[in-house]
Image (cartoon, rainbow, N blue to C red):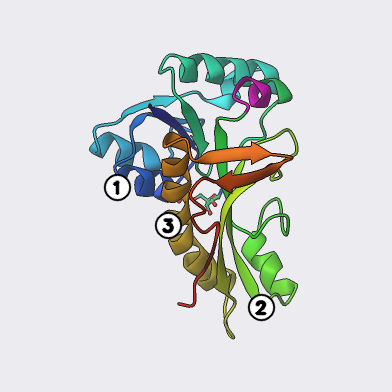
Amino acid sequence: MSIVVLISGRGSNMQALLEAGLPVSAVISNRADAKGLAIAAAHGVVTRVVDHRGFPSRDTFDAALAQEIDRFAPRLVALAGFMRVLTPAFVARYAGRLLNIHPSLLPALPGLETHARALAAGLETHGCTVHFVTEKLDHGPIVIQAEVPVRKGDTPETLAARVLRQEHVIYPRAIRWFLDDKLVIRDGKVRVKGNDAQVLTCSD
Ligand code: GRF
């Protein structure tokens, strides 16, 4: 039933998973200086570092990462601010059990700097998405989204903070659904058994 969480930095989403009581058996970072490693350790969770800089290619890094992940035989691999593009072989290995959280309402704004881009585009609504990972970056069947309003005077930072609060709500929820076998993927779309809401609208 366990989860391996992959991080590269702050680790606030990982922390939300731990605080939700989800069964995280290990946290792996590609950076030794990722702040989230200390948070995981403080929760008594095993941490590992697989530094991408020690490998000559994406393929060799991903193979080493997979080897480390598989030691924990997880049911689910959760990307939580893991800042590496994954190879098709890695994605295929964990097909159907690899989730990511992305700070936009996909398919809008894949990639980086989503909050600045949302403001530049004059969007009135922004948010975050949990999705299954497929080969194409920030695509893949969507499990749950939370919408937040863009407020007058927002900066990328204020908007990011509003979105992040919702990330911490939807990621644990999505993972709980996965572990409870409530997610059904059909024709590239995810349905939740029991019809729990897959779009949250938040007005704070
Ligand atoms: C989050 O905004 C997440 O959506 C994105 O990277 C950020 C990671 O933040 N993929 P944290 O490390 O979870 O605090």
Looking at the image, is 46 positioned above or below residue 64?
below
Left/right of residue 33 with respect to residue 129 in the rendered view = left
* Relative image position of residue 51 (x, y in whole percent): 52, 25
Q: Mark 3 points at which residue?
A: 169
Q: What element carries label 2?
A: loop
Please tell me which residue lies in front, 136 or 192: 192
Compute the Cα span from label 1 to label 3: 11 Å
| Mark with earlier residue (1, 2) | 1
Residue occupying the point 57% across, 78% down: 154
Label 3 CA crowd tier, 10 Å (few <14, some 14–19, many 20+): some
Assess whether residue 40 is covered by the magenta stretch.
no
Judge whether residue 57 can be spotted in this image. no
The stretch of residues the image draws in magenta is 90-95
The amino acid type found where label 3 is placed reads: Val
Assess whether residue 92 is covered by the magenta stretch.
yes
Please tell me which residue lies in front, 142 or 39: 142
The amino acid type found where label 2 is placed reads: Glu
Residue occupying the point 43% across, 50% down: 173
Looking at the image, is 149 positioned above or below residue 144?
below
The amino acid type found where label 1 is placed reads: Glu
Compute the Cα span from label 1 to label 2: 31 Å
